[in-house]
Amino acid sequence: MSDPTIDAARDILGESLDELSRAVAGCSADELNRRPMGDDTNPLAVIVAHAVHSTRSWLSLATQSPPPERDRPAEFRVVADDPDSFVSWLDGISAECRALLDGGVVYDPGVTATPTWTTDVPHEPVTAAWALLHALEHLGEHVGHAQLTRQAL
């Protein structure tokens, strides 16, 4: 029997990842790397890279899956030199995110774990439920950023 929470999360995740793909579709390298709203904003490539790396990490925590290697500060230095390679990379990491919620996913909302991908601040343990909801809300926030950035381009 499927878990209705995971089913709903899978749908929301899929819609959000599809929106990120649409945001970068057809962009040149210049467009992926431009800061159309000034130096205080992130380029589309950075927004997308951070969004999917974060999502994969939080979903791994939520599903008790091995955490991926992650260099969070490097996500904010991403430069997309080749749009086709960037889209291919996005497709691959999106598939990894989707796979975390497919099939026989282990989801016990009350299990706790501690995020380990940032070392600059101590992290408190969170429940799998919190990690799942945070993964989706954080991704949704960055989908909005990506859509606005694409419009500004």
Image (cartoon, rainbow, N blue to C red):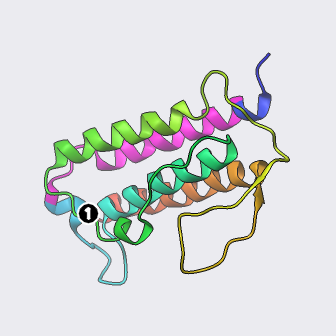
Q: Is residue 28 magenta?
A: yes
Vertical arrangement, residue 15 with respect to residue 46, above or below: above
Vertical arrangement, residue 35 with respect to residue 13, above or below: below
Closer to the camera in the image, 151 or 26: 26
Residue at position x 78%, y 27% in the image: 3
How many labels sit on residues?
1
Quarter of image, res 60: top right
Closer to the camera in the image, 121 or 54: 121
- Residue count near mark 1 (Cα–Cα under 10 Å), binned few <14, some 14–19, many ≥20: some
Closer to the camera in the image, 11 or 52: 52
Q: Residue furthest right?
A: 110
Circle 1: residue type: Leu
What segment carries the magenta color?
7-29
Residue at position x 55%, y 49% in the image: 67
Q: At which x and y percent is residue 54?
A: 51, 57
The kind of secondary structure element at disc 1 is loop
Q: Residue furthest top?
A: 1
> In the rendered view, does 98 fall on the left or right side of 4?
left
Residue at position x 41%, y 47% in the image: 20
Q: At which x and y percent is residue 61?
A: 65, 49
Instruction: Give the residue at mark 1.
Output: 153
Q: Quadrant of the C terminus?
A: bottom left
Q: Quadrant of the N terminus?
A: top right
Residue at position x 34%, y 59% in the image: 151
> In the rendered view, does 44 fall on the left or right side of 63?
left
> In the rendered view, does 76 fall on the left or right side of 8?
left
Q: At which x and y percent is residue 90?
A: 34, 43
Q: At which x and y percent is residue 102?
A: 60, 26
**Main SS class of the magenta portion in the image:** helix
Vertical arrangement, residue 29 with respect to residue 105, above or below: below
Q: Is residue 147 magenta?
A: no
